[in-house]
């Protein structure tokens, strides 16, 4: 998606590779595996510091889990950069996957959202802005330069979410 919108990027595998970045995207996948690799590769604390210093971090699906302050279902560690409580196994099995067109605060037209065993934001702190909801539950939220979605925008043709994040990373505003 970043290539499609003309944004230079690099994959980060070490703390050294965080230097010079305006923002980082924590991808979907399996959050416990991401947490294990981040810890083993010495990225956990540097990523936490990266976000705490006010640099932009976007977590999609498993990335949203890693950003949330409280994680349960089952409980696991996290970076704790987003004042939210999230249920890891919100929608259960792979079959609990779906695509929706959802209104957002980003633009007038709805955004296509692909949910794959999506986590559920159960509680959002007072400093967290809800940018989109599905069935009265937050699915896209922002707190300062932290952005999190429980869906996978990279699986669509719509660059709206990534474009929003890139602007946010560049100047803190959308």
Image: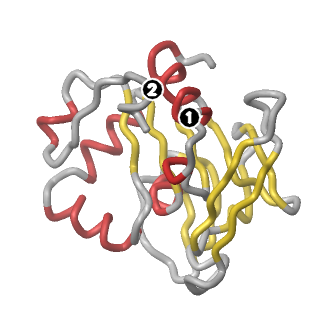
Q: Position of residue 155 (x, y in %)?
A: 51, 53
Quick check: 71 above or below 68? below
Quick check: 18 above or below 95? above
Q: Is residue 140 left or right of residue 49?
A: right
Q: Residue at x 50, y 13 (%)?
A: 171
Q: Position of residue 58 (x, y in %)?
A: 48, 41
Q: Is residue 88 left or right of residue 102?
A: left
Mark drawn on residue 159:
1
Circles 1 and 2: CB distance less than 8 Å? yes
Q: Residue at x 41, y 36 (%)?
A: 51
Q: Position of residue 127 (x, y in %)?
A: 71, 37
Q: Is residue 123 left or right of residue 108?
A: left
Q: Find the distance from the CA under tag 1 to the CA under tag 2.
A: 7 Å
**Residue furthest out toward the right:** 136
Q: Secondary structure at mark 2?
A: loop
Quarter of the rendering occupied by the N terminus: top left
Q: Secondary structure at mark 1?
A: loop
Mark drawn on residue 82:
none
Q: Residues within 10 Å of mark 1 (few under 14, many from 20)?
A: some
Q: Residue at x 55, y 55 (%)?
A: 152
Query: Where, by quadrant of the figure, is residue 132 drawn?
Result: top right
Query: Where, by quadrant of the figure, is residue 35 drawn?
Result: bottom left
Residue behind mark 2: 5
Quarter of the rendering occupied by the C terminus: top right
């Amino acid at each position: 998606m970043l290539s499609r919108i003309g944004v230079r990027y690099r994959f980060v595998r070490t703390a050294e590779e965080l230097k010079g970045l305006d923002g980082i995207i924590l991808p979907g996948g399996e959050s416990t595996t991401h947490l294990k690799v981040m810890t083993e590769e010495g990225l956990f604390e540097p990523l936490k510091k990266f976000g705490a210093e006010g640099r932009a971090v976007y977590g999609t699906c498993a990335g949203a889990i890693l950003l949330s302050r409280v994680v349960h279902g089952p409980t696991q560690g996290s970076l704790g950069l987003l004042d939210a409580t999230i249920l890891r196994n919100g929608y259960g099995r792979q079959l609990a996957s779906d695509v929706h067109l959802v209104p957002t605060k980003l633009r007038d037209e709805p955004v296509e959202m692909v949910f794959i065993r999506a986590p559920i934001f159960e509680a959002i702190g007072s400093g967290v802005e809800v940018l989109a909801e599905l069935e009265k539950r937050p699915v896209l939220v922002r707190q300062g330069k932290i952005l999190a979605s429980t869906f996978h925008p990279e699986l669509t043709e719509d660059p709206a979410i990534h474009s929003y994040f890139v602007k946010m990373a560049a100047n803190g505003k959308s």
